[in-house]
Image (cartoon, rainbow, N blue to C red):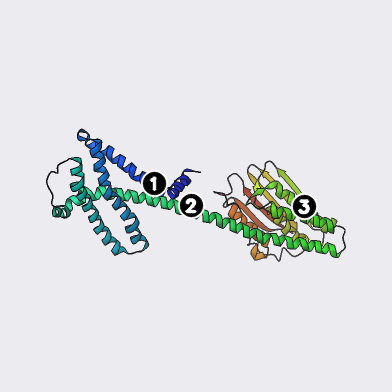
Amino acid sequence: MNLVDAIQYCHKKYRLAGHVVFWGVILVVSIFSTRYYDGSKFTLRQAFIGNGVYMIPQMVGAYWLTYMIVPLFFVRKRYVTATIAFVLGSYLVCVMARFLVVRVTEPLTGVPPKAFETNWEIISNLGKLTYVYYYQIFCLAFLYLFVHILLEQLVIQQRALTLERDKMATELKLLKSQLNPHFLFNTLNNIYALSLAGSSATSSSIAKLSEILDYILYRCNAPLVPLAGEIGLLNDYLSLEGLRYSHRLEVRFEQRLEQDASVPPLLLLSLAENAFKHGASQDLGSPRIDIALAVAGDRLRYCVSNTVAHGAASAAPTPGAPAARNGRIGLSNIQKQLEILFPNRHTFTTGFQGDRFEALVLLDLKKAPHAYPLPAR
């Protein structure tokens, strides 16, 4: 728990104790200030009584300003009422302070007043009420207001961060819920085609699909997952697709890994699955898919390219256009996932290079993917 979290926790759980500590500190500072300015006549008893009693109007002024005037002015937008209330209330608080000094503090401390003041003189001496009491009382009141606003701002910031974490978790969960059925639909179609042909590879395909679903359902529920698990999932998928295409399809998967990494779940699979769906399945000739994965120096590079059917590249939309506009749900989901998990630290491009379609992902792994962890789900 960092300092900000500790302050917020104490402010929320020990609110009353926080008020006591604040005014206790003010009282101690006031006592030492009295000793400094009136050291020859200073006694602890007089300083404690004088500052303790004087703190009553200071507290009234601080709470009245913070919890009544400021909300009335800034929240309820009643500017005229708030202004009149502030002027009138400030006057009454200053009168209270002067009454307490003359009628309570001086008799209790045994200090004779320099000149006896009638009640009328107390309430009508606007110069003394303003220059002696107003500035002393409301300087402290505004200090309390500043501390209050600072703490409230920390609470608001924490709530905003919590809402942002929840939003990110919800969006990632939604993206995965869109992606998994998309992949499952395509894979079941593959198995269905094998079963219609009476292929002996049907049972092997079902076993591979079982392994893939086990990973998707139970082992990739975090926002980021180990790269090794994603590689294993991709190898299972390539094996499954290999059963369908047999020797008609050429797949190359190159790996250069210098260190471990954490990546968004199903990142490798999604791009490979897109290459099969829009490349191999539509190319009636000899389709080829090249997959290259490299991790070095806090950088991850993942590139998937596939041949396309004759004429597909010329009829394709402009490279770099949003994947959803192209009808490719998987690519659109990848873009959204990367924006959430690697803001300003990723590059994702797609486009045609001659007779091949290429999707490239670059990730900066140097910094933590998010400024704060997502909540567990």
Secondary structure under the numbered disc 1 in the rendered image: helix
Mark 3 vs 1, N-terminal side: 1
Looking at the picture, which amino acid does disc 3 mark?
Answer: Asp
Do tag 1 and tag 2 residues touch (Cβ < 8 Å)? no
Q: CA distance from mark 3 to mark 2?
A: 42 Å
Q: Residue 279: where, in percent of width, then height?
A: 75, 60
Kindly identify which residue carries mark 3.
236
Kindly identify which residue carries mark 1.
18
Mark 3 vs 2, N-terminal side: 2
| Residue 237 visible to the viewer | no
> Which residue shows up at 52% across the image and 54% down it?
162
Mark 1 vs 2, N-terminal side: 1
Does residue 114 sit above or below 284 in this rendering? above
| Residue 19 visible to the viewer | yes
Q: Residue 165: where, in percent of width, then height?
A: 55, 54
Q: Residue 314: where, in percent of width, then height?
A: 71, 64
Q: Is residue 298 left or right of residue 74?
A: right
> Which residue shows up at 70% across the image and 56% down it?
270
Mark closer to the observer (3, 1)? 1
How many residues crowd mark 1 within 10 Å: few (<14), some (14–19), many (20+)?
A: some
Q: CA distance from mark 3 to mark 1?
A: 59 Å
Quadrant of the image for the C terminus?
A: bottom right
Q: Nearer the viewer, residue 317 or 45?
A: 45
Q: Quadrant of residue 282?
A: bottom right
Kindly identify which residue carries mark 2.
158
How many residues crowd mark 3 within 10 Å: few (<14), some (14–19), many (20+)?
A: some
How many residues crowd mark 2 within 10 Å: few (<14), some (14–19), many (20+)?
A: some
Q: CA distance from mark 1 to mark 2?
A: 19 Å
Q: Is residue 116 left or right of residue 376?
A: left
Looking at the picture, which amino acid does disc 2 mark?
Answer: Gln
